[in-house]
């Protein structure tokens, strides 16, 4: 535990509570907690299953109906064929898998390569496994796409595992298909297992499209993908995610999880089946809602003098802090004091995150406009 300090989101929550206790308003754009609920049919499927007394046993393992539904979902959505028995493992949310998969692959002292900046659990999971981290820079001059050719050969030869995530949290970047082709060749050359986090595949804007890492030839030979129902279907609190792809990697994670938990609550499995098998119009509606929020927030803040790039996808905005501030945490505190808008300091996302903040599109369009208005009134970018 000496490796872990107090989580940044706990500190931000304390700042929020202190301001609310003083009777002041807070527009919280810090934590990426979706506020769009599931479709009614999904909630009804879970409610019906909750009322069945037979569903209160240990799940132990994933039900065949859910595994089959996931395989069919991947076939329909991504044109990826998966064996339900050997190439799919449920997760109690992606966070569960990201926290634990390194334990099934890495020995203490092994090298894992993670993006920089990155979502904190990407690095924390390997730390739990005792791994050494190598940060792969995601730089603005390269549109935040990892430059695999810049990784020292000595590091690549020693590394066992690497994590890649596009559309990316926190930078919101999207990598071109050429990057993924290079990634597969890189992993084969150096015998590295790849984990591709694809939690935001449905949240891409302006008519863009996104697929699956597993669509590419050779991907299943060297890696797995994580996917999640949290943002796409509004099921964040239900904790539903999946590890899919290479059967050996999936099998090792299944073995680990069989010793750590008793599976996903059966009514939640019922909700998952309904979400991915039923009417998919909710996906387009959710995407459109986030795109409208992005436009209100980014267009307004740019008009207020805050220069930033509008994200092509995800539910986040990655924005530079003014040059007058010496740290992103100092800017976050000042922004909250002057405007009531709470965002996350970029320093929470690794060494390269300093100098930026992340804003989550988790409030209504009205609240996004209120945030813009408060920033304009504050004169912080004047």
Image (spheres, rainbow, N blue to C red):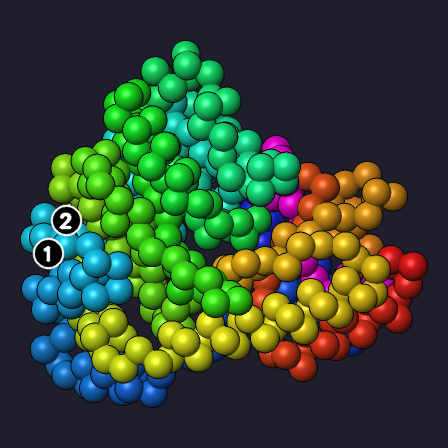
Q: Specify the principal SS of the magenta part.
A: helix
The reply to whether discs 2 and 1 touch (Cβ–Cβ < 8 Å) is: yes
> Residue 343, how many percent across, how many down?
67, 58
Distance between the alpha carbons at the discs numbered 2 and 1: 6 Å
Figure disc tally: 2
Residue 346, magenta (yes or no): yes
Front-most of residues 119 and 317: 317
What is the residue that sits farthest to the top in this orientation? 154
Residue 189 percent location from the top left of the image? 28, 21
Q: Which residues are magenta?
A: 336-353
In the rendered image, which residue does mark 1 sit on? 84
Q: Is residue 267 above or below residue 343?
A: below
In this view, 195 is above or below 91: above
User: Few, some or many C-alpha atoms within 10 Å of disc 2 (few <14, some 14-19, many ≥20)?
Assistant: many
Left or right, 63 with reference to 295? left
Nearer to the camera, 88 or 98: 88
Decide if residue 241 is in sight here.
yes
Give the residue drawn at x 37%, y 48%: 197
Query: x, y percentage for residue 113?
Result: 42, 29
Residue 246 lies, in percent from the top left, at 18, 41
- Residue 93 visible in rendering: no
User: Around disc 1, counting alpha carbons within 10 Å, would you say few (fewer than 14), some (14 to 19), or many (20 or more)?
Assistant: some
Q: Which residue is mark 2?
A: 87
Q: Classify mark 1: helix, strand or loop.
A: loop
Q: Secondary structure at mark 2?
A: loop
> Quarter of the image containing the C terminus?
bottom right
| Residue in the picture at 63% in, 52% down | 318
């Amino acid at each position: 535990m000496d490796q872990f300090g107090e989580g940044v989101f706990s500190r931000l929550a304390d700042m929020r509570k202190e301001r609310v206790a003083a009777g002041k308003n807070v527009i919280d754009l810090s934590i990426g907690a979706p506020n769009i609920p599931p479709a009614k049919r999904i909630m009804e499927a879970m409610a019906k299953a909750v009322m069945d007394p037979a569903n209160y046993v240990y799940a132990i393992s994933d039900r065949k109906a859910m595994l089959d539904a996931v395989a069919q979902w991947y076939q329909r959505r991504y044109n990826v064929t998966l064996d339900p028995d050997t190439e799919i493992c449920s997760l109690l949310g992606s966070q569960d898998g990201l926290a634990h998969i390194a334990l099934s692959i890495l020995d203490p002292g092994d090298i894992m390569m993670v993006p920089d900046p990155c979502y904190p659990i990407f690095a924390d999971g390997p730390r739990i496994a005792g791994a050494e981290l190598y940060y792969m820079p995601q730089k603005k001059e390269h549109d935040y796409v990892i430059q695999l050719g810049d990784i020292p050969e000595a590091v690549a030869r020693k590394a066992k595992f690497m994590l890649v995530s596009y559309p990316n949290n926190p930078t919101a970047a999207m990598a071109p298909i050429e990057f993924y082709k290079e990634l597969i060749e890189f992993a084969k050359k150096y015998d590295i297992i790849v984990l591709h986090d694809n939690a935001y595949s449905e949240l891409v804007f302006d008519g863009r499209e996104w697929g699956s890492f597993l669509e590419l030839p050779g991907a299943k030979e060297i890696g797995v993908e994580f996917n999640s129902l949290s943002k796409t279907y509004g099921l964040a609190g239900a904790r539903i995610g999946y590890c899919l792809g290479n059967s050996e990697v999936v099998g090792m994670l299944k073995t680990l999880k069989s010793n750590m938990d008793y599976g996903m609550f059966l009514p939640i499995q019922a909700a998952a089946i309904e979400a991915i098998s039923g009417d998919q119009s909710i996906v387009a509606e959710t995407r459109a809602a986030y795109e409208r929020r992005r436009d209100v927030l980014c267009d307004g803040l740019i008009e207020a003098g805050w220069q930033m790039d509008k994200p092509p996808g995800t539910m986040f905005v990655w924005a530079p802090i003014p040059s007058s501030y010496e740290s992103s945490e100092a800017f976050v505190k000042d922004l909250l004091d002057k405007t009531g808008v709470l965002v996350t300091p970029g320093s929470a996302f690794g060494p390269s995150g300093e100098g930026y903040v992340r804003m989550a599109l988790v409030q209504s369009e009205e609240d996004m406009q209120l945030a813009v208005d408060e920033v304009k009134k504050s004169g912080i970018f004047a």
